[in-house]
Image (spheres, rainbow, N blue to C red):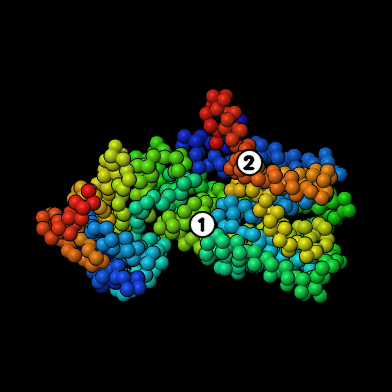
Amino acid sequence: MTAVLETQSLCKAFGGLIATNDVSFSLPAGARHALIGPNGAGKTTLVNLLTGVLQPTSGRILLQGRDITGLPSHKRVKRGLARTFQINQLFADLTPLQTLVLAIAEREDAATGWWRPVGLRRDLIDEAEALLLQLGLIDVRDQRTATIAYGKQRLLEIAVALAGKPAVLLLDEPAAGVPETERHQILDVIAQLPASVTLVLIEHDMQLVFRFARTISVLVNGGLFMEGPAADIARDPRVKKVYLGEELVDV
Amino acid sequence: MSALLTYFRPDTRTASGALLAPARWQPLEILFWLFAVSLFWLAPSKVLLLNEIAILALFALSLDLILGYAGIVSLGHGAFFGLGAYVAGLLGKHGLHDPVAGLLISGGVAALLGFVTSFLVLRGSDLTKLMVTLGVALILRELANKFSTITGGADGLTGVTMGPVLGLFEFDIFGKTAYAYSLAVLFILFYIARRLVNSPYGLLLRAIKGNSLRAGAMGVPTSLRLVIIYTIAAGYAGIAGALLAQTSQFVSLDVLDFHRSADVLLVLVLGGSGQLWGAVVGAIAFKIMYDFLAAITPQYWQFWVGLVLVLIVLLGKGGILGFYGAGRDWLANRLGKGGVR
């Protein structure tokens, strides 16, 4: 099976601090992969390297077999690498409908059309509406994003990424800060994502990790500490020590 | 009749209707343009002032495209206005007397400057943008001052002669043709801007303004998209400047003065940025206020303009149009109809 997302000896140093240390992994199409690790393990740096926010000091990133190491963020998105943010990054003044229509338009290279009103683009609108329905956002369709409930905003965050029909979706703590009562909605949406999308979950919440992830990478001090099937990782005493040990301290 | 009604009030329960509603012309907007045209006969003694208002409105409209929709702050938008004015003036002086051709060339030259400087402006923070735009405007002013053999320098550019508009309408000393000409240009460019802001590209600009990080994460090459609107807005400003030069048949260094850039910002904030009508309403309010206050206190009129500006910014969001919208919503709620979009 060919890898959809692959890194080869990825390194990132900030001066003397090595934030990412020789990370190589490879994900097959349809993977359900979680990236875990204690605070400061370098998860955020790795995500920033993958999405193109940061340039690696050395190493390569391949998406669907093509080298994307030198590409800026927006071009990686066009190649099929979408992400959600740990802290919502949405358009406060636009409605969910407008946001999704725009995301779909951008995917279709129609977002520079400057004469026909948005409201007459049936093709874009129908797809946006279907997505709103799928993610349970139809009831807030025309409200300003800034005014909708936080849980719904988290869903919209996922919806925007999905609108680009990505091959790989990086979910950065998708349920962070969501009240318990709205949490199940997010979990349901993740559970129902099409199998063709490769999921990378960057997560603290072990309950969420073990519900979705079939494979797990554990990052410690910027390097890959361990990787393997979720069940093995869960049982491994060393992971427990590194990871859960810190969790106990946190409590 | 019902077809007409669905045009003005598309069914907002449907997704396309909800998106279309703001793109539809409202009766009040149509009335406004009819009223503006009727002033040609109703207030012939005021056409000089009306001409100035139309030009200022167009200038503010161009700033609104970058500031109100794309979130690009500028303290030097006057550079494009002044350049347009000088190009139009020089064309009129040196043989090209056709106003419309002169207008298009002036707009094109200003757009070219906008395109070139956009690469300087679009990098960096808001403060960088303010300084770069300010700097470009200052440089242009000094160039116009320095090359006085071409521009007339401090004495101004005289000897600008204009042929009839479209070969039909001669400019008259009362300014009637001038007003009709400026109003027509304003309307056409307003219409185009209105199409633009309600298109996918207009939505995209608002998105970049709202959160460029997310826009980039959607795959949008944000800087490239902003270059386009900056270029268009510069062209709009250039045309506004050209209108001034053509209708007054004179250009002075004043067109490149800092106060042009400051005034237009003031006009836009006064009227309400981020909505095209804000530029028009702001221009009307500003000019009328100026006309009125300058008559009472010629020395201190800016005191009152400043006071009004501070009050508008502190008391409400969105300038005069913001107050209008809030009042309308309040009234709609009182009448029990729910909010009107």
Where residue B228 appears, as percent x and y from the top left, is 56, 61
Where residue A188 appears, as percent x and y from the top left, is 26, 43
Q: Is residue A70 left or right of residue A41?
A: right
Q: Nearer the viewer, residue B142 or A220?
A: A220
Where residue B76 appears, as percent x and y from the top left, is 66, 61
- The picture quadrant where one finds residue A149 is top left
Q: CA distance from mark 1 to mark 2?
A: 28 Å
- Residue B76 seen by the camera: yes
Q: Is residue A242 left or right of residue A169?
A: left
**Circle 1 or circle 2, nearest the eye:** 2
Q: Which mark is residue A112?
A: 1
Chain to which mark 1 belongs: A
Q: How many marks?
A: 2
SS class, disc 2 = helix
Q: Residue at x 28, y 39 (%)?
A: A180
Crowding near the residue tagged with mark 2, few <14, some 14–19, many ≥20 C-alpha atoms within 10 Å: many
Q: Residue at x 75, y 49 (%)?
A: B302
Screen quadrant of the N terminus of chain A: bottom left
Q: Amino acid at mark 1?
A: Thr
- Residue B101 seen by the camera: no
Crowding near the residue tagged with mark 1, few <14, some 14–19, many ≥20 C-alpha atoms within 10 Å: some
Residue under label 2: B321
Q: Is residue B275 above or below residue A7?
A: above
Chain to which mark 2 belongs: B
Q: Amino acid at mark 2?
A: Leu
Q: Is residue B216 above or below residue A22?
A: above
Q: Nearer the viewer, residue A240 or B241?
A: A240
Q: Outermost residue, top direction?
A: B335
Q: Residue at x 19, y 51 (%)?
A: A248
